[in-house]
């Protein structure tokens, strides 16, 4: 049973007939319960679910990075929902039903801070990945104190490891430790920068894939 605590002009909580009301992040909403679908598995619906599933797996595994990287887009929505919308609309490709994510387009961070210059990675040392970049702190709106954000994503295990407050932009290198269980797995590598006060981020950069040692 639905309740209208402040009269007919107040917010609705619960269900009244086909109308459902509630509140999320302090925002009152109402929606109409959808009618039953005669065929919930049309080709279009299946394709959309497949796209949704692979995007969800990718973003759930990288959610800590996203919380920083999409902070500026969490307006009346969560950072995760903002990232979900972006990746679904910009980075999912392939031919149905075998959809794939284009990691070069699947940004884990979005912002106007100057990005990574000449980023590269080294996976030769067992249990480690080294991220390197050129110091561009004198260019654009970059700052010497910007912090490196690095991430190693393991698609086969649907998990990642990351550092969200790493070396200064001027240092040019950051080592991250990865689990020994990653050895032999293909990993996807990403990097971005965040300002020292956490208010600005750069777009993430995809640095390619490699086999973990």
Image (cartoon, grey):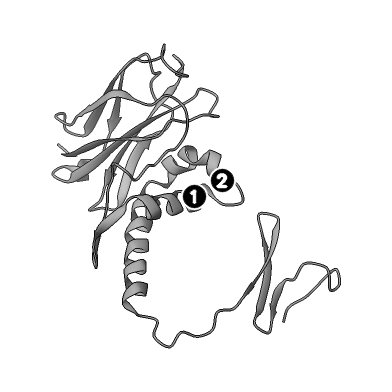
Vertical placement of residue 143 versus 2, above or below: above
Query: Could you say which disc has been placed on residue 82 in the image?
Result: 1
Vertical placement of residue 68 versus 166, above or below: below
Residue that lies at the very extreme toward the right in this rendered image: 7
Q: Where, by quadrant of the figure, is residue 85 drawn?
A: bottom left
Q: Position of residue 89 (x, y in %)?
A: 39, 54
Query: Could you say which disc has been placed on residue 74 in the image?
Result: 2
Q: Exactly how many numbered labels are in the figure?
A: 2
Q: Position of residue 98 (x, y in %)?
A: 22, 64
Q: Residue at left 43%, top 50%? A: 86
Query: At numbered mark 1, what does the secondary structure look like: helix, strand or loop?
Result: helix
Q: Residue at left 21%, top 34%? A: 127
Label 1, label 2: how far apart the Cα atoms are: 7 Å
Q: Where, by quadrant of the figure, is residue 26 drawn?
A: bottom right
Instruction: Pick the residue in front: 67 or 106.
Output: 106
Query: At numbered mark 2, what does the secondary structure look like: helix, strand or loop?
Result: loop
Image position of 184 (left or right of 172): left
Image position of 211 (left or right of 24): left
Image position of 72 (left or right of 164): right
Q: Looking at the figure, which quarter contains the N terminus?
A: bottom right
Instruction: Pick the residue in front: 115 or 191.
Output: 115
Q: Looking at the figure, which quarter contains the C terminus?
A: top left
Q: Position of residue 11 (x, y in %)?
A: 77, 67
Vertical placement of residue 118 versus 68, above or below: above
Q: Where, by quadrant of the figure, is residue 35 drawn?
A: bottom right
Query: Could you say which disc has been placed on residue 103 in the image?
Result: none
Q: State yes or no: discs 1 and 2 in contact (Cβ < 8 Å).
A: yes
Q: Position of residue 87 (x, y in %)?
A: 38, 51
Q: Residue at left 34%, top 25%? A: 116
Q: Would you call the spot at circle 1 few (<14 residues within 10 Å), some (14-19), or many (20 or more)?
A: some
Mark sitting earlier along the chain (1/2):
2
């Amino acid at each position: 049973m639905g309740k209208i605590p402040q009269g007919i002009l107040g917010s609705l909580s619960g269900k009244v007939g086909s109308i459902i009301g509630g509140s999320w992040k302090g925002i009152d909403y109402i929606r109409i319960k959808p009618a039953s679908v005669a065929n919930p598995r049309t080709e279009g619906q299946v394709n959309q679910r497949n796209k949704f599933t692979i995007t969800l797996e990718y973003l759930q595994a990288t959610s800590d990075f996203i919380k920083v990287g999409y902070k500026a887009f969490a307006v009346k929505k969560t950072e995760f929902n903002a990232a979900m919308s972006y990746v679904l609309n910009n980075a999912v490709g392939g031919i149905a039903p075998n959809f794939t994510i284009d990691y070069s387009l699947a940004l884990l961070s979005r912002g106007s801070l100057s990005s990574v210059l000449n980023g590269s990675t080294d996976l030769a040392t067992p249990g480690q990945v080294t991220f390197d970049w050129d110091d561009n702190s004198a260019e654009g709106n970059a700052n010497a104190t910007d912090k490196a954000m690095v991430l190693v994503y393991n698609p086969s295990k649907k998990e990642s490891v990351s550092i969200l407050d790493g070396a200064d932009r001027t240092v040019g290198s950051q080592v991250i430790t990865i689990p020994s269980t990653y050895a032999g797995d293909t990993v996807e590598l990403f990097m971005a920068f965040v300002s020292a006060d956490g208010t600005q981020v750069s777009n993430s950069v995809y640095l390619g894939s490699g086999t973990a040692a």
